[in-house]
Image: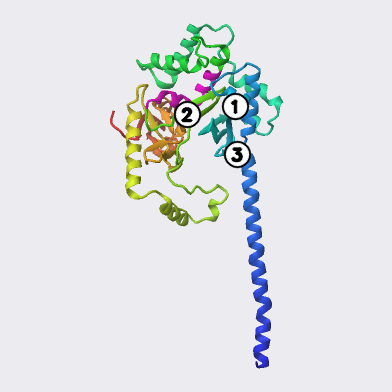
Amino acid sequence: MPACCARQSGSRLPAIKVKYLFLAWLGIFVGSWAIYMHYSSYSELCRGHVCQMIICDHYRRGIISGSSCQDLCEEGTLMLQHCLSSSPTHQVYSGVWKGKEVIIKCRIEEALRGDGGPDSAPRRQLALFDKPSRGTSMDEFREMLLSFLRSCLGEQPSLGSLVARIIALADVNQDGKVSLAEAKSVWALLQVNEFLLLVSLHEKEHTAKLLGFCGDLYVTERVSHGSLYRLELPGYLRPLVPSAVHAQLNQWLAPAWPRRARITIGLLEFVEEIFHGSYGSFFLCDSSPRHIGYNGKYDCKMADLESVATEMAVRGYLKGRRCEHNSDCTYGRDCTATCDKLVKQCNGDVVQPNLAK
């Protein structure tokens, strides 16, 4: 080999080594960052152990009751497994209850996020389990429930039957009476929007079935596919993956077109059913794929009812709200009203969804 070629080859080798060393370092750095972000976000989002500790503490002290309490706190046949939470205050876990796959949901107050020790439990008790008070009669409790449902669902002729269903649900030991712990538990649960909707829409085939509860923790059936698309990137990875690549991957992973059509028809049936519900009208205010699931037969199943809102809630939020444009009059992601630009206030009538009554 000529001397000039040998010199050129020798000069390229160090450059190539530096290039590969840099790429290796960059890969290690990005990988370490992703692992760090995963575990830091996991510890922030996933606090199911705090939920279980507080719930079981209240159960052992006789403050709350529920059909799932004994299995969760004593027998260990209701177990939290994989964290699915998207918010630190709204804990969602897949789990197993007596060998059956379920979804377990629980709320954590903002004040408890930084400190999950036993000293936090009394604060949560005061906030959630203070009603009804000791000495409340059954008639007074029924009136409490009826008044609450009127405020949430409006004046509906069928509310009496819904009250009866809630009382039957609260009567865990089926002795025909509702204890104070049972009443406190079901009252706390009704403050959770999704639980209220699960009870109100229990006859709908497109909603997950309520299986049990303990305090304000509740258990539903697990939907086989909890999201319309299978690929759900963690928040910290989304900036690194181009949206076109993400969309293309989901196109490949999504069900075949005939099956997508079946899911879509089921979703339309669900929207129509809830708009003319037995206990008032409901709106689907966030139709993003993460809320829409399906079972093994490709029947639409709503994995998360947090996207559904009562007509009363939507109207109450929008009416009189200050606005400059129609886009300012939005509840959730998809429920919108018009903006009266003369008085700069939102109208209460929803224009989207625009199903005819």
Q: CA distance from mark 3 to mark 1?
A: 21 Å
In front: 211, or 206?
211
User: Measuring 60% from the left and 39% from the top, which residue is drawn there?
Assistant: 45
Tag 3 secondary structure: helix
User: Measuring 40% from the left and 36% from the top, which residue is drawn there?
Assistant: 301
Amino acid type for the residue under numbered disc 3: Leu
Direction from residue 32 to residue 338 in the image, left or right: left
Q: Which of the labelled discs sits on residue 72, or is there none? A: 1
Decide whether residue 333 is among the magenta residues: no
Q: Which residue is mark 2?
A: 194
Q: Which residue is mark 3?
A: 45
Residue 307 visible in image: yes
Amino acid type for the residue under numbered disc 2: Glu
User: Measuring 55% from the left and 47% from the top, which residue is drawn there?
Assistant: 235
Q: CA distance from mark 3 to mark 2?
A: 19 Å
Looking at marks 3 and 2 on the same chain, the residue that comes earlier in the sequence is marked by 3
In front: 350, or 309?
309
The region drawn magenta spans: 185-203
Classify the position of the C terminus by image quarter: top left
In front: 147, or 67?
67
Q: Examine the rendered structure and indicate whether residue 23 appears above or below residue 89.
A: below
Tell me, yes or no, whether the two marked residues, 3 and 1, touch with CB atoms within 8 Å: no
Residue 222 in the image: state x and y as whole percent: 47, 35
Tell me, yes or no, whether the two marked residues, 2 and 1, touch with CB atoms within 8 Å: no
Q: What number of labels is visible?
A: 3
Decide whether residue 196 is among the magenta residues: yes
User: Measuring 46% from the left and 15% from the top, which residue is drawn there?
Assistant: 168
